Amino acid sequence: MPDTQISLPASNRAIRADRFEAGLFARKTGRSVWSRLPLLTFAFVLVLTMCGCSAGIGEPSGAPSLSPGALQVGEVSVSAESLSFGDVTVNGAAREILTLNSIGTLPVTVNSAATSTAAFSIEGASFPVTLDPGRSMNLTVQFQPAVVGASSGQLSISSNSSAGTTTVVALSGTGTAADPELTASAASLSFGSVAVNVATTSNLTLTSTGTTPVIVSSAQIQGAEFTIVGGSFPATLNPGQALSLLIRYQPTAAGAVTGQLTIASNSLNGGFLTVPLTGVATAIAHEVDLSWLPPSSSPDPVVGYNIYRSVGGGGFTQLNSVISLAAAYVDNTVASAVTYGYVVKSVDASGVESTASNEFQITIP
């Protein structure tokens, strides 16, 4: 009897079915013959059940199904598909943060990151960097325009991400012209009348009124009676920010005085801001009030007194042009920093003077 072979395309396996026997009878010949089909069919179905495939003759219920294992990948994502820096002053700088996230099941390696134009750059990052699943890193991207106008570019991030080896982030920003401007709270400062050697102060406020910061580099004063006692330089004032200067006026001699405050900055409305200063110094009115006791006894009645003064230790001269009837006298012709001496003499009805009293000395402040 020839061998019988059945091929199974699903598993490319063959089943040989010879020399199997089963006790069935064939009526045609009246002889007991061996039919090989039933046992062959059983072996065939058994193999199909084990491999989970079918050759078109039916599949047993509950046949197992095999599936491949979960795919393990490394993948990187970015926090934004584009970064916009808005308006930035020429030669100024603005920064944005871009976050890289490892979202795969395997570590991902970021090999490099680069910008396509010079106006955009990456700060403080070194590569390559390997991120474990769930980890992230921040990239600081800077926009520093060199010219006025819109700028655009790309940030290209190279990695071994399964989603693509290069991730591209669009970059945009606009360079604007610098506009530093400085204004003063007063066009001039007047200190009015001030007594000699007495100090007074006045405030001057400097304000940044442009759209970009202004740098105040220095402030100088002409005029010895004026000084700056508050405010330090250089100073950078952002738009809307103010700086207060305290100016002091202390005259040393009587009379009108003038000066000038000059402020240097990078303001577009003028590199030098000048503020005139004025003041009037007045002499201090000093006086010496004298009083004395009349003589307790005199052979001749006393009708009045004559007052004498010395200046700086010199000789005495009479101050009063007529006899003083009162035992008091006010000298309002004195000056500061001078020493005066005073004596008084009694006068009788004949105009005869007594000897001089004791001397009183005083130095005027």
Image (cartoon, rainbow, N blue to C red):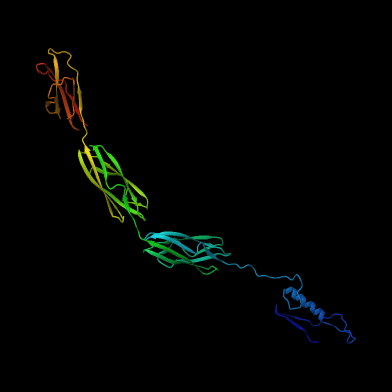
Q: Position of residue 241 (x, y in %)?
A: 37, 50
Q: Quick one: quadrant of the N terminus?
A: bottom right
Image check: 134 left or right of 292?
A: right
Q: Nearer the viewer, residue 309 or 138?
A: 309
Is residue 126 positioned above or below 350 on the image?
A: below
Q: Quick one: quadrant of the C terminus?
A: top left
Q: Position of residue 11 (x, y in %)?
A: 70, 77
Is residue 173 positioned above or below 311 on the image?
A: below
Image check: 329 left or right of 244?
A: left
Q: Nearer the viewer, residue 10 or 23?
A: 10
Q: Position of residue 97 (x, y in %)?
A: 47, 59
Q: Position of residue 249 (x, y in %)?
A: 26, 41
The answer to whether residue 342 is seen in the rendering is yes
The answer to whether residue 222 is seen in the rendering is no
* Tag count: 0
Image check: 241 left or right of 16?
A: left
Is residue 175 positioned above or below 30 on the image?
A: above
Residue pictured at 23% horizontal, 45% vertical = 259
Image check: 284 left or right of 10?
A: left
Residue pictured at 16% horizontal, 26% vertical = 341
Residue pictured at 19% horizontal, 39% vertical = 255
